[in-house]
Image (spheres, rainbow, N blue to C red):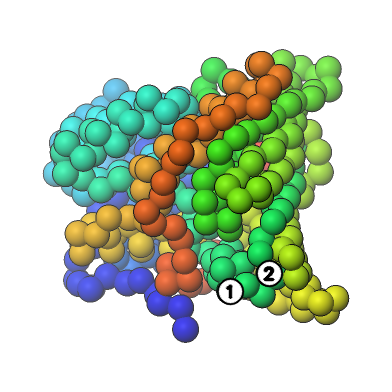
Amino acid sequence: MPTTQASSNPQRKIRYAVVGLGWFAQSAALPAFAHAENSELIALVSDDPAKLAEISQKYSSVQRTFSYAEYDDCLNSGLIDAVYIALPNHLHCEYTVRAANAKVHVLCEKPMAVTEDECQQTIEACDRNGVKLMIAYRLHFEEANLQAVEIVKSGQIGEPRIFNSIFTQQVEESNIRVDKGVGGGTLDDIGIYCINAARYLFQEEPIEVFATTASKNEPRFSKVAEMTSAILRFPNERLASFVVSFGAEKVSSYQVIGTKGDLRVEPAYAGSGEIKHYLTVNGDTQERSFGGRDQLAAEFVYFSDCILQDRQPEPSGQEGSIDVRIIQALYKSIETGRFVQLQPMQRDRRPDLSQSIDRPPLEQEPEMVRAAGPSGKS
């Protein structure tokens, strides 16, 4: 049976401030505290007074609210032990470093930053101040994806040779995901899921990458490409490919093909609801369903447990930095039209089934306060 991580000290809870109250924070992070027994929502940080007022009324545990100008006051208030950063990507580095300098632990949404240099700045700040840094790879605690890792490692499909993925959705012009100035774009926002999955399924790092883009002539794609197609070459002559798009119907799947069979996972990157495996070996296909879970609660439980037990998180700053390095190489490939080689990268830890954490799914998505999802729907 998978090991379920839990706090060794049920009396102690890690106290969090949630920084940034956009759609994802409101729909997934804030309600997750109800299922994270070792974690407590104490403070909110936003520059929207309406959000602060209405959301703090929804969650009785919230003791204080702060504007962005008051972020340092929040960090030094003595009220919190950790921050969950759900800001636009271009702010991740600054707000992580400021938290680390205040000796506050950091759970930061992915991508951890927009450049590899910023990633290094955050890692060094957290190391220098002795605080934990975890990047919010929610699928590192989700059973369907972790079981996929075990299936590939077990040899059931033979030697894994090919990874292929599609991750698409419709994103409206007003959404920050299509604003390159704040770190938006298909690679940063959803391509990172495909890159990370290829890495944990192949259990290695790519050595060469190539990418190209295509866009319809629409205002929403004036700052970022509508879609990106990429190829990652891995050691031992293995290839991973994916297509990500902000202008197509919602699809989320990947397939790993080996010398004896293949595994398809769908919807592979879903944040909620059922996920299915289709495992084919010697022409025989078996289907398996995995029920929905509260993936953000699992993240909070795991990270709080790392703080309480003084353990280093598995989705570390190193994990986040590798993905950002790959994304930057893909952008360089788009600019030059050439393959880009990557320096050898080593990862000492990868997600496995022992990290599977089961918390009940949210019964319903909370009502949004001045926040719209990618499609524009609250």
- Determine whether label 2 and label 1 are within 8 Å by CB: no
Q: How far across and down, in percent of the image, does residue 329 sit? A: 56, 27
Residue 233 in which image quadrant: top right
- Residue at 83% across, 17% down: 217
- Residue at 33% across, 31% down: 120
* Element assignment for label 2: loop
* Three-letter code for the amino acid on which mark 1 is drawn: Ser
**334 and 118: which one is in front?**
334
Q: Residue furthest front?
A: 236
Which of the two marks, 2 or 1, is nearer to us in this view?
2
Seen in the picture, residue 16 relative to 297 is either above or below; the reply is above
Image quarter of the C terminus: top right
Residue 68 located left or right of residue 215: left
Q: Is residue 99 visible?
A: no
Q: How far across and down, in percent of the image, does residue 231 sit? A: 69, 38
**304 and 163: which one is in front?**
163
Q: How far across and down, in percent of the image, does residue 100 sit? A: 22, 36
Residue 107 located left or right of residue 128: right
The residue pinned by badge 2 equals 158
Residue 137 located left or right of residue 258: left
Residue 207 in which image quadrant: top right
**337 and 189: which one is in front?**
337
Residue 241 located left or right of residue 202: right
Q: Is residue 339 visible?
A: yes
The residue pinned by badge 1 equals 154
